[in-house]
Image (spheres, helix red, strand yellow):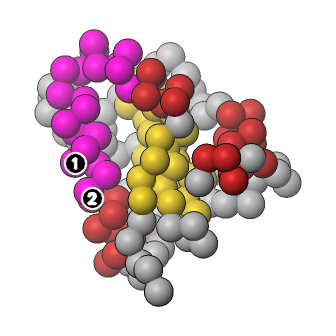
Amino acid sequence: MKTDYTIKTYPKFDKELKKLTRKCPTLKQDFERLKKVLLLDLKRGDHRLTQDRYHQIPRLGQKVNFPVFKIKKFRCKSIPEGNRSPFRFIFILSRKHRVIYFTECYYKSKNEIENKKRIQDICSNYEQYF
């Protein structure tokens, strides 16, 4: 049985990440480090994620059959705030397909919550994305 996960990104996520790179020049490198840590955490935690680092988003509707997580603790080298950076990352975890699908990244002062409609659309058409 295959235990490695594939990390994929939604096209709008890539655009959002590129735009946020203007505020934080090291964001792309920091995101690469985040992906490695996420994969390591899944491997260590027997395919489960800890609540202290990854917050599962509740009440997304019946269309969402996958756990969706928000990363709040994220270390950005360009910002001297430690792991309490102003960036948020949203991803869908499909254990069955072994996919981590990043759907959204945003600056927390611009968006207070995740785009639930985007998550619902992706989950209802997951064959297209996973």
Q: Residue at x 42, y 65 (%)?
A: 5
**Magenta stretch holds residue 87:** no
Give the amino acid type for the residue marked by disc 2 in the picture. Answer: Val
Which is more toward the observer, 108 or 100? 100
Looking at the rendering, which quadrant does residue 86 occupy?
Answer: top left
- Circle 1 crowding by C-alpha within 10 Å: few under 14, some 14–19, many from 20: some
Q: Secondary structure at mark 1?
A: helix
Which is more toward the observer, 40 or 70? 40
Checking the image for residue 33, the label placed there is 1
The magenta stretch is 16-36
Give the amino acid type for the residue marked by disc 1 in the picture. Answer: Arg
Q: Main secondary structure of the magenta part?
A: helix
**Position of the C terminus by quadrant:** bottom right
Q: Residue at x 53, y 36 (%)?
A: 10
Q: Which residue is mark 2?
A: 37
Whole-percent x, y for residue 46 in the image: 42, 82
Q: Which residue is at the far right?
A: 62
